Image (tube, grey):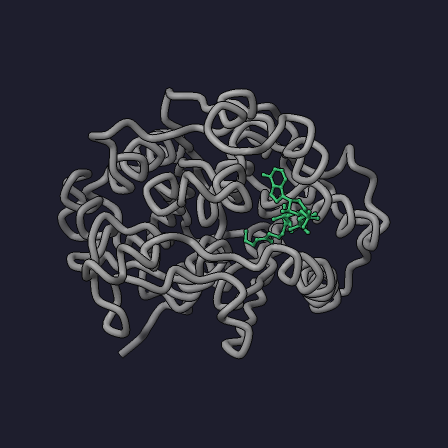
């Protein structure tokens, strides 16, 4: 039987994002813990973050971002074949947040599942989705990064609570016809460093109990300083790996869209790649670290503000719990 040759590439045909309305500023945090706007700004670059309302869950943020991305792509929910959602703050352990989203969207024929790679989650989800499109197994794919981190942060721990925010971003992938689209996605994991960023409670190892609550195991635990050092090295390597695969130099990158964890990490990576900051998308001052949502949130803003244009080479890179790190190179075509 004659089978059509599968498309060689996937491309992004729509982007969308959503953040909750409530703004928590550094000055608000000064009232809550022993911190200062000066410390947070100098050490992280963050000025404010968005916090989900009590009745807003990860799937609700994901829904709003997805509706916008699908509208941008001109794709109806009923025509979506696959939903891959990256999160570390799922609505609940079962069902997957992707299935809850599928139901809200009424994307009845879409297969839906979650991907867990913490802050690198969006690029891991993009890689899965890209491969479905490349093999011809799916035509229209919704890739989402969504988080309500504010529910997993210890609001009495100044070393973590000032960093995180809530939000969601989404892209729609479709088969590419020309030489545009996702050129490559590189993924890495190192489980031996898993203790640097974890949320240890609520799983099979430490199910929810009065003791686990008392020990704060249901909160994000992070060894920020150690992570920082690994992050800078890994991100440079991942970025160069992606470029090398495509026989490109850093100077050919039109826009770097990095995971928005810390301005100092972003600047150090840009510096190592000799990329001027004008070619780096930064919006963490407004949203903080939104984990899996940060790249699609920044990408959508870059598209809306016309910082990405057809033919541009967009490099994305992320680093997070697992440990995991990743990069992706896209030749943009709207
Ligand atoms: O997104 C996934 C991956 N995550 C990351 O990549 C995060 C990477 N790490 C970082 O971004 C940084 O390490 C942090 C922003 C988390 C921390 O910055 P740092 O420059 O590494 O600070 P530190 O942890 O070394 O702490 C320096 C000092 C300490 O005081 P002492 O021991 O020197 O007296 C902390 O207790 O700053 C103190 N400190 C604070 N002071 C005021 C820690 N948090 C705060 C705070 N306000 N919020």
In this rendering, the answer to whether 11 lies above or below 278 is below
Q: Is residue 220 left or right of residue 177?
A: left
Dividing the picture into quadrants, the one containing residue 317 is bottom right
Dividing the picture into quadrants, the one containing residue 293 is top left
Q: Residue 126: image x %, image y %?
A: 45, 56
Q: Is residue 22 left or right of residue 77?
A: right
Residue drawn at x 65%, y 62% is 226
In this rendering, the answer to whether 203 lies above or below 51 is below
Q: Residue 15: image x %, image y %?
A: 45, 36
Residue 325 visible in rendering = yes
Residue 334 visible in rendering = no
In this rendering, the answer to whether 179 lies above or below 149 is below
Q: Is residue 54 left or right of residue 254?
A: left
Nearest the eye: 218 or 13: 218
Residue drawn at x 32%, y 55% is 218
Nearest the eye: 100 or 179: 100
Q: How many marks?
A: 0
Q: Residue 28: image x %, image y %?
A: 49, 21
Nearest the eye: 46 or 304: 46
Q: Is residue 23 left or right of residue 148?
A: right
Residue drawn at x 32%, y 42% is 151
Residue drawn at x 52%, y 41% is 158
User: Which image quarter holds the N terminus?
Assistant: bottom left
Q: Residue 262: image x %, image y %?
A: 64, 43
């Amino acid at each position: 039987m004659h089978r059509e040759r599968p498309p060689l590439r996937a491309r992004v045909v729509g982007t969308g994002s959503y953040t909750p309305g409530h703004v928590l500023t550094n000055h608000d945090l000064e009232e809550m813990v022993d911190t200062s706007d000066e410390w947070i700004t100098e050490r992280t670059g963050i000025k404010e973050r968005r916090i989900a309302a009590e009745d807003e869950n990860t799937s609700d943020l994901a829904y709003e971002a997805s509706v916008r991305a699908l509208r941008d792509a001109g794709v109806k929910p009923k025509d979506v074949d696959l939903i891959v959602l990256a999160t570390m703050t799922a609505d609940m352990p079962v069902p997957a947040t992707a299935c809850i989203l599928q139901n809200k969207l009424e994307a009845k024929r879409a297969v839906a599942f979650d991907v867990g790679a913490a802050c690198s989650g969006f690029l891991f989800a993009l890689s899965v989705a890209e491969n479905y499109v490349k093999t011809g197994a799916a035509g229209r794919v919704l890739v989402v990064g969504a988080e309500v981190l504010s529910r997993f942060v210890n609001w009495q721990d100044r070393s973590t609570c000032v960093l995180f925010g809530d939000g969601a971003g989404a892209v729609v992938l479709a088969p590419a016809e020309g030489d545009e689209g996702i050129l490559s996605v590189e993924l890495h994991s190192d489980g031996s460093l898993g203790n640097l960023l974890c949320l240890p409670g609520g799983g099979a190892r430490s199910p929810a109990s009065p003791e686990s609550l008392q020990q704060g195991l249901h909160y994000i635990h992070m060894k920020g300083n150690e992570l920082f050092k690994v992050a800078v090295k890994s991100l440079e390597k991942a970025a160069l790996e992606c470029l090398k695969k495509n026989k490109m130099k850093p100077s050919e990158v039109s826009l770097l869209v990095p995971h928005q964890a810390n301005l100092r990490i972003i600047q150090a990576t840009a510096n190592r790649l000799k990329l001027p900051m004008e070619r780096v998308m930064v919006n963490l001052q407004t949203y903080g670290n939104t984990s899996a949502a940060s790249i699609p949130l920044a990408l959508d803003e870059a598209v809306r503000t016309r910082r990405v244009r057809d033919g541009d080479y967009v490099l994305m890179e992320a680093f997070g719990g697992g440990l995991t790190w990743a990069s992706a190179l896209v030749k943009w075509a709207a």
